[in-house]
Amino acid sequence: MASLVLQFTALKCSPLSSSFLSQPSLFTQHRHNQRRASTSIVNSVALANAQNKERVQLKKLFEEAYERCRTAPMEGVSFTLEDFTAALDKYDFDSEVGSKVKGTVFYTDNNGAVVDITAKSSAYLPLQEASIRKVRHVEEAGIVAGLREEFLIIGENQADDSLILSLRSIQYDLAWERCRQLQAEDAAVKGKIVGVNKGGVVAEVEGLRGFVPLSQLSTNSNIEELLEKELPLKFVEVDEEQSRLVLSNRKAIAGNQAQLGIGSVVTGSVQSLKPYGAFIDIGGINGLLHVSQISHDRVTDISTVLQPGDILKVMILSHDRERGRVSLSTKKLEPTPGDMIRNPKIVFEKAEEMAQTFRQRIAQAEAMARADMLRFQPESGLTLSGDGILGQFTSDLPEEGLDLTEVPPAEAS
């Protein structure tokens, strides 16, 4: 304020000349300039007073806040010190290499994904660690923004202290565990052939690569032709410590063949078409559905009825285990002759019912054949039991022979 007074007292006005007063416009302008200068000075004083007042208020607020922090630091805080400690424990984790952490994928790029694991530094999932299988982008392994998953810490980037994560290592351990379980259950699995060598083929099972020796392959074809194909396999040896996974195609095929009873119905897929019929994959075994066994109606062009990849139910007509040949039929499963051509869906739906009817007819025919044999060859010394089984004569067989009037006739389908 004193400086302003000094400024006022130091102001000196030069005497007005008569020529200046004689020009009204110049005089008016001069007075206007004086008023503007005075207004500017007054405004400066008012602004300075307001700023000083604000400084005083801020100083008072800081002093009061300091006093509260010194005397009552927890006053007005909605949670206690114990709550704060619990919150820290909730988000605390072991960041050592080899430990597992929960994280949420923040975003992905061509080289991997950034993962939020609530740590001080960021974490990164490289592409090669995103899956046990080879992928070109993390999204192929289901890694997308927002995904929450458990990761394994496998390293640290010294440049920025960020952590390096892995899903592949976790999946690798789970895959071995799954293979041990399947081996204990003696279960058959599908394996894709991904490599061949002089000793056998390499198959991918549960994301792991296992070896199938030539002696454990049931096919006689060139093993090069097996590349990229799937084969039924069973586990022979599962040794994670030695990284040994030995598989057998023969064991899987033997298990499947045990279920191929004559007259049984199985589900298969059309593998290829030939002029004489279609090859059907039934659990890793190729069976032939001859053109004459497709339908009661004549089939001139198989491709009008079947296509590779079609799923259908077939009946086992015969099985030559030594030669590895299986004969199939859909003709026997037709509720009405020609259904395989006009309505294949109903053949699929009623396959088991029609197979049961067919087996009953076969049993009746066999029973009548046995009875006829006994009628015309009584000297054979055989008798027909109630189950239709031939055996030696028993004391309960009448001397005049069998009464064939009770033999039921074959029923029409």
Image (cartoon, rainbow, N blue to C red):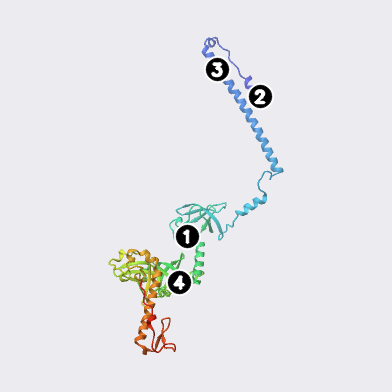
Q: Earlier in the sequence, mark 1 or mark 3?
A: 3
Q: CA distance from mark 4 to mark 1?
A: 24 Å
Residue 120 vertical position relative to residue 390 in the rendered view, above or below: above
Question: Circles 4 and 1: CB distance less than 8 Å?
Answer: no
Residue shown at the point (70%, 43%) measured from the top left: 70
Q: Earlier in the sequence, mark 4 or mark 1?
A: 1
Q: Is residue 266 visible?
A: no
Q: Earlier in the sequence, mark 4 or mark 3?
A: 3
Q: Which amino acid lies under the numbered mark 1 shown in the image of this protein?
A: Ser
Q: Which amino acid lies under the numbered mark 4 shown in the image of this protein?
A: Lys
Q: Which amino acid lies under the numbered mark 3 shown in the image of this protein?
A: His
Q: What residue sits right under mark 3 in the picture?
A: 32
Question: Circles 1 and 3: CB distance less than 8 Å?
Answer: no
* Residue 111 point in image, percent of width and height: 46, 54
Q: CA distance from mark 4 to mark 3?
A: 107 Å
Q: What residue sits right under mark 1 in the picture?
A: 131
Q: Which amino acid lies under the numbered mark 2 shown in the image of this protein?
A: Ala
User: Which of the labelled discs sits on residue 2, or is there none?
Assistant: 2
Count residues near mark 1 (Cα–Cα under 10 Å), then give few for <14, some for 14-19, many for 20+. Answer: many
Residue shown at the point (61%, 23%) measured from the top left: 42
Q: What residue sits right under mark 4 in the picture?
A: 234
In front: label 1 or label 3: 1
